[in-house]
Image (spheres, helix red, strand yellow):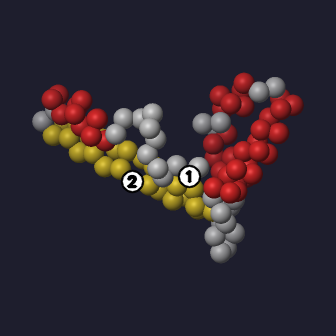
Amino acid sequence: MPVAAEREDLPKPGDYYDRLRPLCARIDIWHTIYNHVMDGPEAIIEWFKGSALRPYLAALAADRRGDFLGAYGARLAKAYPARFDGKVLLQFPRLFIVAVR
């Protein structure tokens, strides 16, 4: 479940390069993974409530959201084990592209 692995539904950096390079004089592409120190699975849930979880929560009836978030939190706890101090590291990949015409 950690997001460090490349997603199959997104283009690879080389795909972006191939599409953009014919249009650019220079292109820089880099990929990095931020490790956000979080207090635990609940903090990860709060992090994503304002973005990635919004469509899922909006589609659920209000009385079902608690069950969904509980199950999601249990899966997060397995995927992001607590470190020695009780914190978890949320891996958050980012792809940056700077293209100059």
Q: Amino acid at mark 2?
A: Thr
* Residue extending furthest toward the left: 25
Element at badge 1? loop
Picture disc at residue 2: 1
* Residue extending furthest toward the front: 8
Instruction: Kindly report the distance in space between the C-alpha atoms of the residues bearing marks 2 and 1.
Output: 14 Å
* Placement of 13 over or under 56, stated as above or below: below
Q: Amino acid at mark 1?
A: Pro
Decide which of tag 2 and tag 1 comes sooner along the chain.
1
- Count every numbered label the image shows and give the total: 2
Residue 21 place in picture, x, y as percent: 18, 34
- Classify residue 8 as left or right of residue 98: right
- Residue occupying the point 80% across, 35% down: 65
- Classify residue 63 as left or right of residue 28: right
Picture disc at residue 39: none
Residue 101 sits in quarter: top left
Picture disc at residue 32: 2
Q: Classify 10 Å Cα crowding around label 1: few (below 14), some (14-19), many (20 and above).
A: few
Q: Classify 10 Å Cα crowding around label 2: few (below 14), some (14-19), many (20 and above).
A: few
